[in-house]
Amino acid sequence: MNLKKTLSLLLVMLSLLSVFAVGVSASDIGIQPLWDNTRIISCRVYVDTDGYGYAESDVFGHFSSNKIEVDVIVYEKNGSDWVYVGEDHVTSNTNFCFTSYQFDVSDGAVYKADFTFTVTKDGVDEVIEKTCYSE
């Protein structure tokens, strides 16, 4: 095989590999939604050594976001049902909001928290919902 054909074949193979590699890596890490008002959202539910449970979240809006509202509702698993524990509502008039809702826990129980985040920029609300579970 001459050098020109070998290089052409090598370039085609590398091109194909890069297309497949990008496709695989995108599915492996998951694709982050493209939000207009929101940069980062994280949430967690855990039981601490102090005997209480916590449903917490961090929300970072884009730099021009000027209001963030967080609603969280906590449930305890009872058999196959989720039983209401309590809820909290927090509003921040900046582009960052941290929430920490404390609740009473039962020994060995599993909890979930349904979060609704409303991030406002230029008068437009962006609503994002997430559910987090305790371990």
Image (tube, grey):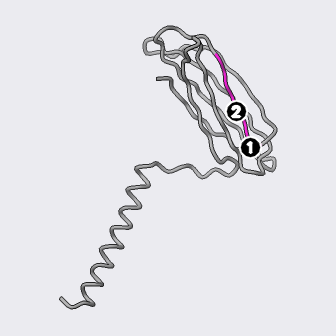
Q: Classify the position of the N terminus by image quarter.
A: bottom left
Question: Given this view, does label 1 or label 2 mark the residue nearer the observer?
Answer: 2
Residue 80's image quarter?
Answer: top left
| Few, some or many residues within 10 Å of mark 2 (<14, 14–19, 20+) | some
Q: In the rendering, which numbered label is found on residue 51?
A: none
The percent position of residue 12, horizontal first and vertical second, equals: 32, 77
The percent position of residue 7, horizontal first and vertical second, equals: 29, 84
Q: Which residue is at the front of the view, 116 or 61?
A: 61
Instruction: Report if residue 83 lies within the magenta region.
Output: no
The percent position of residue 51, horizontal first and vertical second, equals: 57, 11
Helix or strand or loop: what does disc 1 sit on? Answer: strand
Residue at 56 percent across and 25 percent down: it is 45
Find disc 1 in the rendering and name its residue.
Answer: 125
Residue located farthest toward the left when viewing the structure as drawn: 1
14 vs 75: above or below:
below
Residue 3's image quarter?
Answer: bottom left
Helix or strand or loop: what does disc 2 sit on? Answer: strand
| Few, some or many residues within 10 Å of mark 1 (<14, 14–19, 20+) | some
Horizontally, residue 94 falls left or right of residue 2, namely: right
Q: In the rendering, which numbered label is found on residue 98?
A: 2
Which segment did they paint magenta? Answer: 95-102
Going by the numbered disc 2, the residue's amino acid type is Phe
Q: Main secondary structure of the magenta part?
A: strand
Q: Tell how many labels.
A: 2
